[in-house]
Amino acid sequence: MTRPILALTELVPGVYAWRRASNGGIAVYGARDGGRGLLLVDTGADDRAIEGLQEWIEHFDAAEVSVINTHDHRDHTWGNAALAARGARLLAPPAGAEPGHRWETWLNGLQVECIALPGHSPDSRAVIVRGVAFAGDAVYTPDILRRMAVPAFLDVERALASLDALEAWLTRGEAAPVPPSERWLVAGHGQPLRGSEAAGAVAATRAALEAALEALAEVMGPPSYGPAPAPDEEQVLEWLRVTGMSAQHLSSMNFWRRVAAGYAAELARRRDVGVP
């Protein structure tokens, strides 16, 4: 193979991470016919990612290919249809599960476990293979938070519960086959992290969320009673400005209005139920 489009980093034997506009992964396993199988976690954000994945399918001489997504957003699923047309099997864990719900399947001896992590989207999940958790946009690494200070969650209450569930997987269960110090976290964007640094990314995401809530409360002013008010466009722009968001994000106003509405709903929930 000439220089690959997608450079792989082997995190544990047979499990690789790749980075482009979004992150993804490849897990190698033994196929039923004695050949090699590949599990693709997410399929990229553009046609070049599809080409890169196809290169690796050919390089590994894969007899079978399966695809599973961390969530159904186009920057993580761009290649699904093209790869399915070439014979890949799309795996579909249940969508809409509550935070922490677990689902698993086996690919000829390879255990694939999913933990539901809704908040960024209703179907967000961590896909776990051999102690590596590909968590999509349910968590943000510190290098990404330095450029994007507001975690893009539409349901903030469930996002917080999802962060708790992910933190539990990263830090608990010393007797598990892979101890916490050796567990990897691959977020949808940013550097792969292991052990305490992975757990630190969860804590950093939670702290950024709380800071964004506080900033929105300042922008919107004293709360009123009744349904949570949706921030208007000026308030959304001011919220992004005071949190230090770069101008590139302002072109996606429809999305950020939805994010701001999700944060405003959490402010209203805390007011009504007395969450500190």
Image: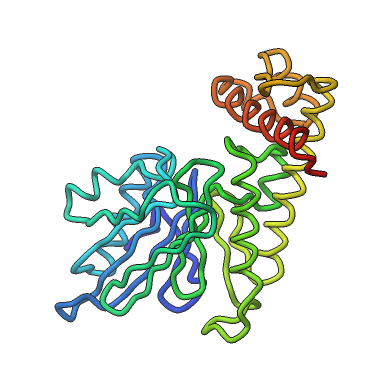
In the picture as drawn, the residue positioned furthest to the left comes out as 33
Q: Residue 180, how many percent across, how many down?
A: 63, 76
Q: Residue at x 48, y 71 (%)?
A: 10
175 vs 72, left or right, is right
Determine the image quadrant of residue 238.
Answer: top right
Q: Is residue 260 above or below residue 99?
A: above
- For image coordinates 61% across by 51% down, the residue present is 139
* Residue located 32% across and 47% down the image: 50
- Front-most of residues 128 and 18: 128
Count of numbered circles on the image:
0
* Spot occupied by residue 83 in the image (x, y as percentages of width and height): 24, 50
Residue 211 image-quadrant placement = top right
Whether residue 124 is visible to the viewer of this picture, yes or no, is yes
Q: Nearer the viewer, residue 269 or 241?
A: 269
Q: Position of residue 110 (x, y in %)?
A: 34, 76
The residue depicted at 45 percent of the width and 59 percent of the height is 7
- Position of residue 127 measured from the top left corner of the image (x, y, whole percent): 45, 61
69 lies left or right of 192: left
Nearest the eye: 263 or 212: 263
